[in-house]
Amino acid sequence: MNAAAFYFESSMAQESTEIARGLRRRDPDLLDRLIEQYQHRLLRYLVYLTGRRDLAEDLFQETWIRVLERGHQFNDKYAFSTWLFSVARNLAIDHMRRKQPSSLDGLVDNNMQNNEDRAPFDVPDAAGASAFDLTLQREQGEQITAGMQHLPAEYREALVLRFQEGMSLEEIASVARVPLGTVKSRIYRGLSALEPWLKGAQL
Amino acid sequence: MKHMPNNDAHQQARKLIALSGAEILSANQLSDQQSSNAWLAAHLETCASCRTFAENAADTIHGLRAIPIAAGRGLVSTTQIRVRRRALELQRQRERMWLVAVSCTAVTLCALLSTVAFWLGFAWLGARAQLASSVWQVGFLVFCVMPALVAAILLLAKAKDKDKDKDNDNDNYKHLAHHTGSYQG
């Protein structure tokens, strides 16, 4: 077990070193590969962070341009995904600051809150499930999506990084640049705030 | 952990559930080695509201994981093209900067070498002509300043010519205006 963990950790470290070396060289092939590899994770994070698909797609492209330009700043002691999400987060905050001077709170789109019918998240049908399961899953997904839209951006971010990206609490703290205790409280509060929405789906 | 007040116990249990994620919620995955997990398992057996919270949390987490958001092929290829184009721009910029740096270094080196060579030349000429050192040094100074002086004089002269042309044009316009006025009248 320990040997497997050691092998896993060393291969991760080796991968980070290779990425850091490639980013310093601004290797376009490496960047192509990274874009392919992290496309869904990064877009999902940005969609949840901004609450808008179109803005998330713009920021997605800007993030990779920034990765190219600032690649030499990546420290291979950390996981690439942590650094990538930090870059994306900073760009999202910069975007909101340009729009209106505020923190991540500004990422809760007022238009979106006023218009509950418009879902920014796509909830496509899952393949290979029964009609009942599909309907249930779809309803549950819609309720959670609606609930997520009403959460403060900080809570959304913590929930997405924890439960969708499977990041450790320390990694989330590093991305969000907040103490570990704040991350724990955001996850707890975010999950508690989503509970009533899920109950609505089960009724 | 066993002797905490009731409200604190519920909050502690809910925090543990939230932070552990969906994994902790299946009883067979609870590890007795971890005291907090064992305590949580015991608490969940006796507390219905926390059990409901745990079930809801598990459903929420499963629901969150089940919402697929996929990047379109177009977005990925557009991003790749933009990144490649920017990489090319940065490479060209770097090459240009390198060229500028090399040129600056070459010019500085040439200036230094030629200054030394001319200084020695003027010293040799001064010695040949049996001039006082202050004389050939002033000559060297004038020689060094001369190109800048000539350029400045030429530029001033050009500017003066331009002003003169402008004045002539204005006179012509005035003259024309005067004539047009007379025709109109």
Image (tube, grey):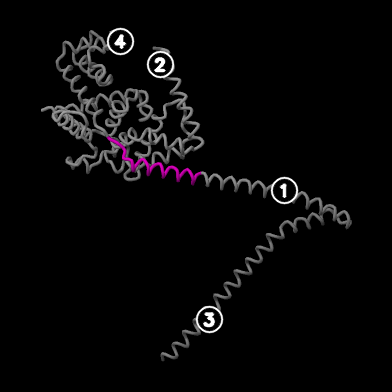
Residue drawn 22% across the image and 44% down it: A111
Using the image, name the chain to which the residue with label 3 belongs. B
On the image, numbered disc 3 is attached to which residue?
Answer: B171
On the image, numbered disc 1 is attached to which residue?
Answer: B112
The crowding category of the residue bearing disc 4, from other C-alpha atoms within 10 Å (few below 14, some 14 to 19, many at least 20), is: few
On the image, numbered disc 4 is attached to which residue?
Answer: B34
Residue B49 percent coordinates (x, y)? 15, 17
Q: CA distance from mark 3 to mark 4?
A: 99 Å
**Range of the magenta residues?**
B69-90
Residue B180 percent coordinates (x, y)? 45, 87
Using the image, name the chain to which the residue with label 4 belongs. B
**Dot in front, 3 or 1:** 1
Q: Amino acid at mark 2?
A: Ala
On the image, numbered disc 2 is attached to which residue?
Answer: A5
Residue B175 percent coordinates (x, y)? 50, 85
Classify residue B147 by image quadrant: bottom right
Residue drawn 46% across the image and 84% down it: B177
Classify residue B161 by image quadrant: bottom right
Q: Looking at the image, do the residues carrying marks 3 and 2 touch, with CB atoms under 8 Å apart?
A: no
Discs 1 and 4 lie in a common subunit? yes
Residue drawn 72% across the image and 60% down it: B146
**Dot in front, 3 or 2:** 2
